[in-house]
Image (cartoon, rainbow, N blue to C red):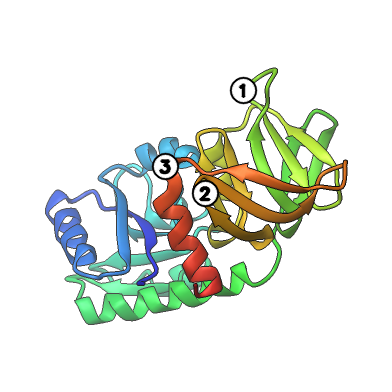
Amino acid sequence: MTEKYRCILIDDELLALAYLRTLCETIPNIEVVRAYDNPVNLLNDLPDLSVDFCISDIVMPSLTGLDLALQLNDLPIIFTTAHNEYAADAFDIDAVDYLRKPVQKERLEKAIEKVVQILHQRAAKPLVVNVTTSKGKMRLVSNQVVAVSSETIDRRDKLVTLSTGEEWIIKNTSFEQLLNLLPNEQFCRISKSEVIGLSFVTGYTGETVFTSFKSKNGSLRNFTLSDNYRKEFLEKLRRKFGT
């Protein structure tokens, strides 16, 4: 099965944006989540988006692509532009690639291959993110996260179960915001109220996901798989374990 990578597009010229979207949609492993003609709108939506990378114009009136990249929380970015003079600046901020307009499909595919390499490298090692919990600021290590659930007292908060047996309450955070921070291929939402760490999954059947994590009573903990999230869960499981 072809692995899907989700992207957002930004270009203030509508014709260029439409062309780029059409081009991306001809590449089988790319899913365009959203296309923007205003980078400020993109930044406003970013906390609620779950994406893998961004393709952005550089010269825009409200905010340049270079300035935008600095606010994307290390999201890999490919630049497209009709200008040569920004190449050095683009690579100074670790842009994945720099494509001249009009963008050619073959050239875009090579740039996306670089993105995929970066994503795989990141997925291979644990990521440490800072979160605000009921105990204060904490450093969350991605490969220790077994599951994230809606907190029963205040559903705006999330209960994180760690492989150490600890449980943290992360304050006022959506699932989308957490998934945007954590490595995409290591986690999957399995229901409206739960996200699971795929490295702890040992199998599934029907509506049940089995894991290697033991609850405090010593029994292996199982989770419920919702029909609405089954397709994404099975796709990620196949990609991760080759099943």
Q: N-terminal of the two: label 2 or label 3?
A: 2
- The x and y percentages for residue 2 are 35, 72
Of 181 and 64, nearer the camera is 181
Q: Mark 2, residues whose alpha carbon is within 10 Å: few (<14), some, or many (≥20)?
A: few
- Residue 155, disc: 1
- The x and y percentages for residue 148 are 66, 41
On screen, residue 58 versus residue 192, left or right, reads left
How far is the residue under mark 2 from the one under mark 1? 28 Å
Q: Which label sits in the foreground, 2 or 3? A: 3
Query: With respect to residue 119, does 33 lie above or below?
Result: above
Question: Which residue position is annotated with label 3?
Answer: 227
State yes or no: discs 3 and 1 in contact (Cβ < 8 Å): no
Question: What amino acid type is highlighted by mark number 3?
Answer: Asp
**Residue at image point 72% right, 40% down:** 160
Q: Mark 3, residues whose alpha carbon is within 10 Å: few (<14), some, or many (≥20)?
A: few
**Residue at image point 36% right, 76% down:** 111
Query: With respect to residue 167, does 233 lie above or below?
Result: below
Q: Which label sits in the foreground, 2 or 1? A: 1
- Residue 237, disc: none
